[in-house]
Amino acid sequence: MPKTLTLIATSAMGLESVVAKEVKQLGYEDVIVENGRVRYEAEVSAIPRSNLWLRTADRVKVLVGEFEAKTFDSLFEQTKALPWEQYIPEDGAIPVIGKSVKSTLYSVPDCQAIVKKAIVERMKNKHGLATRLEESGPMHRVEIAIHKDHAMLTLDTSGVGLHKRGYRLNQGEAPLKETMAAALVQLTNWKPDYPFLDPFCGSGTIPIEAAMIGQNIAPGFNREFASEAWDIIPYKLWEDALNEAEDLANYDQPLNISGSDLDHKLVDMAKANATEAGLGELIQWKQMNVRDLTFKQPNGYIVGNPPYGERLGDKDQVEQMYRDFGAIMKEHPSWSVYIITSNESFEKLYGKEASKRRKLFNGFIKTDYYQYFGKFE
Ligand SMILES: C[S@@+](CC[C@H](N)C(=O)[O-])C[C@H]1O[C@@H](n2cnc3c(N)ncnc32)[C@H](O)[C@@H]1O
């Protein structure tokens, strides 16, 4: 196992700089931002720490090698030349997934099969095995990703995507990914002492992520990762990372976080999810129409993912709701408001130009994140 590794934290389009900031906050330097990913050099202990702490990344991968490849022969030989035996044990399971974009080698199943053959041949040579590999051991999922003839071979350390924190028992119709919800909170200037509200909370993802950010709780504390079973990461490094997470959590930080939704069934779901996350007492939940919002304190933050009105028949109703919401918030200028929606007329309907806008993809939906900075009292 090399002493320093190149790690790749993958991210949704538009969130790369948010992921990069998190990686830097973990203490890793020389962070390079690329399309849909962030690359950094770190010691092996960064694998447990990154998986436990990165709130906005989709996965953490180890870069095994990269090269130009325009023929299957060259893909095979260059894959075989990489030191796979330094990462994967003799009995490791090695599924290979792939993708190819704008490249000569466009047949993904063929690329996967060739990469698999090259790795198996390399492993058999290095381990002196004549028969096929058993693959009965821990999962080491390889990805071959080719973009404009540039091939990258990575090993996935996360297993299930990092958005799966382990607290979501149930979800509404259009739940936000936990990674995106965390990013929406991190893109605000909210500090844990300020009031925080999601008036379209659905299954509660945004308030739950805000509470974990507010108390500095590592998002991965409640789940497992594929690389926990890897020989090359001494288990002590996982224990150290978990102990560090426990030390850094600030359970005494008081929070003033609420979530509300029109649909009482979703409010119950949000409550159950928060309890599963261990945050049951920390967040106030309420069934409420956004039109009935009232504010007891100044200087709060609203972060919301309202309906976008994309479904036939919904549009007029949703647009009227945006107008009503804007009219209410006009009376509370000390509150900052952050809304993600694909509705391009949002500012017009809300009645105010945003202080800032940011393009984001919510899954495959092109959205804008409209940000209204409050005037503090
Ligand atoms: C896109 S979903 C939010 C999903 C949520 N972020 C999650 O992760 O589960 C929009 C939510 O807005 C709620 N909603 C629609 N109209 C509303 C209104 N007038 N007032 C309050 N909530 C409303 C819906 O019930 C729905 O749960």
Image (cartoon, rainbow, N blue to C red):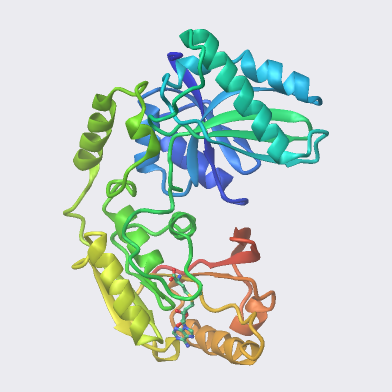
In the foreground, 236 or 128: 128
Residue found 48% across the figure and 7% down from its top: 128
Q: Can residue 83 be seen in this view?
A: no
Against 261, residue 353 (above or below) is above
Can you say whether 317 is above or below 245 in the image?
below
Q: Which of 331 and 125 is in front in this view?
A: 125
Q: Quadrant of residue 22?
A: top left
Please name whichever residue, 276 or 57, is drawn nearer the observer in this view of the structure: 276
* Location of the C terminus (image quadrant): bottom left
Residue 280 spot, x, y in % from top left = 21, 67
| Residue 52: x %, y % from top left | 34, 41
Q: Where is residue 148 in the image (x, y as percent from the top left)?
A: 79, 34
Please state which of residues 229 and 210 is positioned toward the viewer in this rendering: 229
- Residue 264, quarter of picture: bottom left
Q: Quadrant of the N terminus?
A: top left
Q: What residue sits 54% from the left and 9% below the top?
A: 125
Q: Is residue 196 left or right of residue 351?
A: left
Left or right: residue 150 versus residue 60 is right
Give the residue at x 18% y 68%: 281
Residue furthest front in the image: 131
Outermost residue, left side: 252
